[in-house]
Amino acid sequence: MNKPGLVLVSVSLLALAAAAYAHNAICDCFDNGDETITCEGGFSDGGKAVGVPMRVLDTSGKVLIDGKMSDKSDFSFPKPKVDFRVEFDGGQGHIVTIDGRDIEK
Amino acid sequence: MLYTPEAALKESAPVELALVFSHPFDNGFTMNMGKPEEFYVVAQRGEGEPKKTDLMQYLEPIEWAGLDSKAAAYVARPPRNVTRSLGDYTFVLRPAPYYEGNEDKYIQQITKTVINVGGLPGAWDEPLGLPVEIVPLDKPYANWVGGVFRAVVLSDGKPVPHAEIEVEYLNHEPQIGERRFDPAAKVTAPQESFSTLSVRADAAGQIIIGLPKAGWWAICALNLDDGLKHEGKELSLDAVLWIKATDMK
């Protein structure tokens, strides 16, 4: 008697799991023109990126700044004096890397 | 027409707009526009708060060439910081009422064009609370050619059953730099009925249109608010939504 119900439950759980991963991480940064950079992020389903870890690294991979997205899904930091890249770490498969040279005003 | 070349920008960039009053399919006769009553953009990134930016200061009066006539129109080049964030941008134009001599009445078409930066959606499916508006049920900036587009027609926030709709393809691509429509047409109508497609909303005020060709399509819901007057004459209050179809290749 229980079997059909169990099958249905597991199918719907699978469907939920598939749906939960069917989005992409999105992050973009701009130069505020006052020696600071602001990055904004989110997910392609409109989801927020609150608390997502953000890292600023130099060309050797050394972490210069370690932070996270604010409750507005943004992250501001002082512009490093050296070449750098920004990593938005939305979890496995959801890491976005932005080259500092591509960040415009 | 509230035109900008791209509906889905890969990354933030300054957006150039042309505000022209014409018949999008044939573009022969272009009509004079008075100074718009309102011109602004509502930006929203993901589930964040919507942010309204007035754009009236960026309006530049110009003369725009249709195929058979020139008329007063506007271009606007808001600076990059207006469209710098990721998300949806709904541009709204409330033009000055236009006197249509043939019908001895005024026409005012409240027009929306929705674009997106970076693929992070905003509230493209929410009404802005305009007196009349067409609210998308499908992302208005991400439509493949051959798909359908659905929307609901609202007046005072309520669906308009059986609303009278006109759909036109933007057959002559605007050339903002030259301030004209491309004289070359993309398609030819076999008969006048094909220039302006006529559609009725269903009993729930919903419309569905097909998108058989890449480019911009205008959906116009006519005469949504009975009994309005402007300078003693009848005023037809219309809602327009521009959407773009993209080739699947």
Image (cartoon, grey):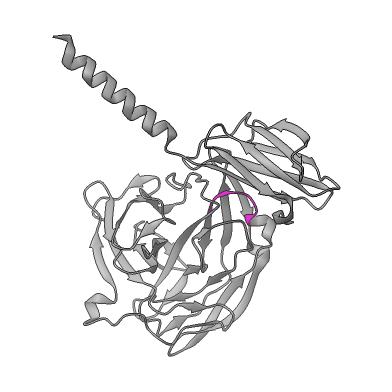
Residue at far left of view: A1
Residue B249: x %, y % from top left = 37, 64
**Quarter where residue B220 is shown:** bottom left
Is residue A33 rendered to the left or right of residue B132? Answer: right
- Total marks shown come to 0
Residue B38: x %, y % from top left = 57, 60
Please name whichever residue, B16 or A50, is drawn nearer the observer in this view of the structure.
Answer: A50
Please name whichever residue, B35 or B135, is drawn nearer the observer in this view of the structure.
Answer: B135
Tell me what residue is drawn at x 58 percent, y 57 percent: B40
Which residues are drawn in magenta?
B83-89
> Is B195 covered by the magenta stretch?
no
Residue at far top of view: A1
Residue B218: x %, y % from top left = 38, 66
Q: Is residue A83 above or below residue A63?
A: below
Tell me what residue is drawn at x 36 percent, y 80 percent: B186
Tell me what residue is drawn at x 23 percent, y 54 percent: B162
